[in-house]
Image (tube, grey):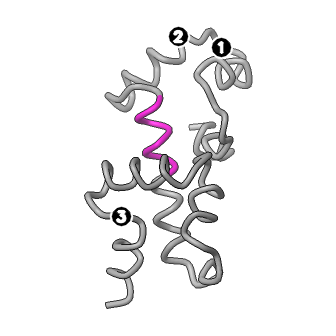
């Protein structure tokens, strides 16, 4: 919950160990908690959080002047290619295709 409320997932170099330190919990225990609550591995969960944020930003008119890469970086991805790959895996669309589908 803290991960999403405090948007900890937007840290580009976030690892399980870094997050565990921030939450003052053992990293193995944190991994177990994430898996039991989300049925996902740490990286998949973090990427899902990032994709959810990026989808909100792509739909938000306040971010209309941002490039798609900038939105990916704002969401916590550390490169355009990582953002595109994760977005496509999660939504079956590229960020560009997703953004265009919102205009209809």
Q: Which residue is mark 1?
A: 25
User: Is residue 45 rendered magenta in the image?
Assistant: yes
Name of the residue lying farthest toward the bottom = 104
Which quadrant of the structure image shows residue 38? top left
Q: Secondary structure at mark 1?
A: loop
Report x, y in % for residue 28: 52, 9
Report x, y in % for residue 27: 59, 12
How packed mark 3 is, by other alpha carbons closer than 10 Å (few <14, some 14-19, many 20 or more), is some
Name of the residue lying farthest toward the front = 81
Q: Which residue is mark 2?
A: 29
Residue drawn at (68%, 45%) of the image: 6
Residue drawn at (40%, 35%) of the image: 44
How packed mark 1 is, by other alpha carbons closer than 10 Å (few <14, some 14-19, many 20 or more), is few
Q: Secondary structure at mark 2?
A: helix
Residue drawn at (55%, 78%) of the image: 60
Report x, y in % for residue 99: 41, 76
Q: Secondary structure at mark 3?
A: loop
Which quadrant of the structure image shows residue 25? top right
Q: Which residue is mark 3?
A: 94
The C terminus: image quadrant: bottom left
Front residue (pair 79, 65): 79
Residue drawn at (38%, 89%) of the image: 103
């Amino acid at each position: 919950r803290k991960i999403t409320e405090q948007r900890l997932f937007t840290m580009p170099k976030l690892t399980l160990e870094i997050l565990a330190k921030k939450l003052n919990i053992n990293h193995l225990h944190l991994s177990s908690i994430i898996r039991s609550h989300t049925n996902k591995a740490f990286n998949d969960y973090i990427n899902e959080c990032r994709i959810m944020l990026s989808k909100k930003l792509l739909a938000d008119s306040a971010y209309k002047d941002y490039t798609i890469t900038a939105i990916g970086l704002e969401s916590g991805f550390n490169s355009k290619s990582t953002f595109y790959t994760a977005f496509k895996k999660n939504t079956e669309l590229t960020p560009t295709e997703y953004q265009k589908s919102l205009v209809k």
